[in-house]
């Protein structure tokens, strides 16, 4: 059975950095990109104009739809061409802390024949100053003026949601790499 590691954390926490440095390399599902593709698959143009597709509230409605799995599977197929349900996988994303989305995402993976055994969830939770540095360093449009207050607010809000989940909390990227590597090697 393939192993599945979930890696969640606020934007700028280092999820992609960690995922790209695992040895041997598992296939990577970048959940926040999959989420965006799923929304575009599921919503009409007028619906997209009404909602901020990068925020969680839109999912409170989408998760009630019977075709939500089709949207998530579409996103997986688009972002991970050649997805192999028999290969070790890491799914990384901020959205994984949304408990209902997480359950729906896991159900979608099962529809794609990924039946992980075992599965473990890691939470990458660095301090706000590290989050801010990472966000500014990567230089994405709209994030160049990311303030310390933004990082503090984001981390605080995310911690409030994430502490409800069963996961291993890690504060350093290097520790996350070694613990996830050990999980895949076991």
Image (spheres, helix red, strand yellow):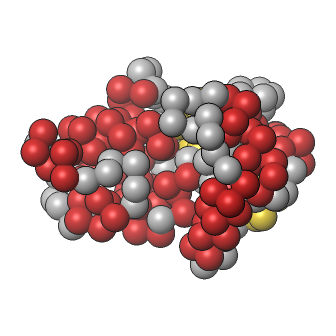
Q: Nearer the viewer, residue 80 or 2?
A: 80
- Please provide percent x and percent y for residue 100: 40, 68
The residue depicted at 87 percent of the width and 50 percent of the height is 172
**Residue 68, relative to residue 173: is it above or below?**
below
Q: Nearer the viewer, residue 66 or 144?
A: 144
Taking 46 as reference, is 115 left or right? right
The residue depicted at 67 percent of the width and 29 percent of the height is 138
- Please provide percent x and percent y for residue 147: 67, 50
- Indicate the quadrant containing the N terminus: top left, top right, bottom left or bottom right: top right
- Please provide percent x and percent y for residue 143: 58, 38
The residue depicted at 16 percent of the width and 59 percent of the height is 66
Q: Nearer the viewer, residue 88 or 145?
A: 145
In this view, the residue farthest toward the top is 82
Question: Total marks drawn?
Answer: 0
Taking 34 as reference, is 13 left or right? right
Q: Quadrant of residue 158?
A: bottom right
Taking 118 as reference, is 109 left or right? left
Residue 106 visible in the picture:
yes
Taking 103 as reference, is 61 left or right? left
- Please provide percent x and percent y for residue 38: 30, 42
Q: Quadrant of residue 128?
A: bottom right
Q: Nearer the viewer, residue 13 or 30?
A: 13
The residue depicted at 12 percent of the width and 39 percent of the height is 45
Residue 155 visible in the picture:
no
């Amino acid at each position: 059975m393939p192993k599945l590691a979930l890696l969640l954390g606020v934007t700028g926490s280092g999820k992609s950095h960690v995922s790209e440095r695992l040895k041997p390399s598992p296939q990577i599902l970048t959940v926040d990109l999959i989420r965006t593709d799923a929304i575009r698959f599921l919503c009409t143009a007028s619906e997209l104009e009404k909602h901020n597709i990068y925020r969680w509230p839109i999912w409170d409605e989408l998760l009630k739809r019977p075709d939500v799995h089709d949207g998530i599977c579409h996103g997986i197929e688009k972002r991970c061409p050649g997805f192999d349900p028999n290969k070790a996988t890491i799914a990384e994303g901020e959205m994984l802390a949304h408990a209902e989305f997480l359950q729906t995402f896991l159900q979608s993976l099962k529809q794609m024949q990924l039946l992980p055994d075992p599965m473990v969830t890691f939470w990458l939770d660095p301090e706000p100053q590290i989050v801010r540095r990472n966000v500014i360093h990567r230089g994405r449009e709209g994030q160049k003026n990311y303030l310390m207050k933004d990082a503090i607010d984001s981390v605080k809000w995310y911690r409030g949601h994430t502490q409800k989940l069963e996961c291993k909390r890690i504060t350093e990227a290097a520790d996350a790499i070694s613990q996830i590597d050990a999980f895949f090697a076991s």
